[in-house]
Each structure stands twice: as C-alpha cells, then as structure tokens.
Image: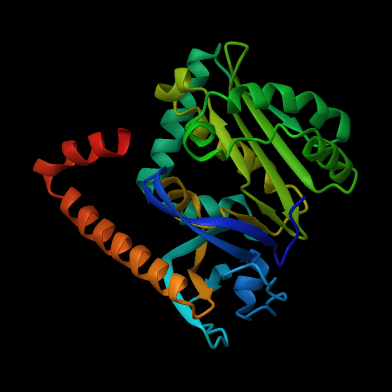
Amino acid sequence: MVQPIRRADSVSGLRLQIGARTIATIPRRLSRVSLSLDRALAGRMPTLPPLPGGEDGYLVTSLPEAVAPVWSGLRFERQRYTRYYVDLAAGEAAWRAGLSGQTRSTLKRKAKKLAATSGGALDVRRFRTADELAAFHPIARALAEKTYQERLMGAGLPDDPAWVRRMIATAGEDDVRAWLLYVADAPAAYLWCGADGGTLRYDYVGHDPAFAALSSGSVLMEAALVDLFSDRFARFDFTEGEGQHKRGMASAGIACRDLLLLRPTLGNRGAVALVGGFDAAMRVAKRAASVPLLQGVARRVRRA
C-alpha cells in the first residue's frame, strides 16, 4: 500500500509521451517523491530523502505552485496541472449543486441509459472487507487486461501476489474501497481506491471497451461517490494529472506542478534539453490540434 508522503520510488527514465502513448524514454535514475493531497493542500515542501549515489536526482510530483524547493542543482518544471478532489464532508447535495447543469444532465442521462440496458436498475457491487476484496480482485483483474490503462501505460490493477496480500491485509485497517459495475450480469467497469488517512485516492480504474458506448466508467464513478458521502472519508482525491471527467466531477482543486531536481552533470543537462524541446513541441502540437482541419490528423497520431 502506498503511503502518504508519499514515496521515494525509483524511476528508471524520463518518458516522452503523446497522450497515453510513450514514444521514447531518456535513461535517468530518479527518486520519485509524490505529495499526498493533504500535504499539497498544506503547502509545505517535504524533506527530500537522501539521494542514493547511483541516482541522477528527484522527480517531485504534486508540488503546490507556491512552494519552491531548496536545490543547488538543475531544476526543470515538467508539467502544471490542477489536482482535483471532491469535498465529501460538504455532503452530496453541495457536491451536486456545484456541478454544472450540463454535467448533472449528462450523468443522469448516462445512468438512465445504462440501467435500461441492464434490466432497469444499476448493478453496482461494493467491496470493503478482506473476503470481499479477495473475490473482487480476479474479476477486476480480468477487466484490467482489456483496458487502455493496461495496454498503453501498464497502469491496470496489479496482478502481483504480494500486492494482493498487502491489499487484503490493508482491508483489515478499513483502508480500501472498491466497486464493480455489471451490465446484464457481465462485469463492465471497476474502481479500486486506497486511503491516505481521511482521504480516499482514485488509484485504479478501467472498463471493458465493449461497454464504452454506455459510459460505464462515468456511471460507476458517480455511484462510488454517492456511496462515499456516507462513509468516513473527508475528501476523494482524483490524484495527479487532469482529465475532463476529473474537472467535471470535482468540487475543488489545487494548482500543482511536477519538478525534476537533477545533479548538475553534463548528461543531465542534455536530458533536460531534450525533455524541454519535446514538451515545447507537444504544446505547439496541442494548440494546432485545436484547429478543426487538423483534429483528424491529431487523433490518428495518438492512435498510431
């Protein structure tokens, strides 16, 4: 289970990505330090763990924009984004009132359409205890194998036996929530969330592409949030990065950035130059893709 500060995992390279697809990786060994939502909201720079001798620097993620780390080497801002979350403590009525009229209408329409396909009612199944999660995992894992998160990013629900054992053990501490959405008795979407104290994280999600037209992931997300308004958590954390579904369903957000903090070596200077050039090119391409005549080309590039 990933813990709040959050981790100092080793990252083996800097990815150059178009959408979810990695087109190249620059070899660098980095210690990844990810701030939890609570730490980001507190606006404090964490103490960086000692940097191992064989590593090139740190990748610090979800650092609030107003926080500047003390670092004598190279620093490079990789991206900026809003880290979105739902204020569960405010209650469901306040959350729905804060959604746009279009979002409320869209959620209602999608749920109604999916329910009609599934016999007239939504079939959402909740998992919380160790026994329940042991039953949840193989079903969700079979779904994960079909998802783009698994195919393109390797970010589907883990299949590692040690991870599964930790999940079941953590369930005893009431720190896991999971859901499955069924359509006509067939599993269509899953959501797995771990806790950071009073915050629940949006960790693993996916849906069967066969049910994509029914927006099964969005319907499941709304059902899970409704459950959580009567649970023990104060916030639901959509975690790092942005997305239309996060913006649409969140009630608040904090401006964050990801920073590279590197040793001032020649190799690291070259890596920063390559990453900077690629990121600048992607920003130009993104603006160009907003031109109607070029949108089809952009979609083909992302799918290639």
Percent coordinates x, y for residue 211 in the rendering: 47, 20
Residue at 47% across, 80% down: 74
Percent coordinates x, y for residue 111 in the rendering: 49, 28
Task: Please tell me whether residue 156 is drawn above or below residue 186 in the rendered image.
Answer: below
Task: Please tell me whether residue 229 is drawn above or below residue 7 in the rendered image.
Answer: above
Q: Is residue 36 left or right of residue 146?
A: right
**Front in this rendered view, residue 197 or 112:** 197
Percent coordinates x, y for residue 6 in the rendering: 70, 64
Q: Which colour scheme appears in the figure?
A: rainbow
Q: Quadrant of residue 22?
A: top left
Residue at 30% across, 39% down: 302
Task: Please tell me whether residue 77 is drawn above or below residue 45 in the rendered image.
Answer: above
Residue at 50% across, 64% down: 253
**Front in this rendered view, residue 262 or 19:** 262
Q: In the orientation shown, which residue stands out farthest toward the front?
A: 266
Percent coordinates x, y for residue 256 in the rendering: 49, 70
The quadrant in which the C terminus is found is: top left
Q: Is residue 108 left or right of residue 48?
A: left
Residue at 57% across, 70% down: 56
Q: In the orientation shown, which residue stands out farthest toward the left?
A: 293
Q: Quadrant of residue 63?
A: bottom right
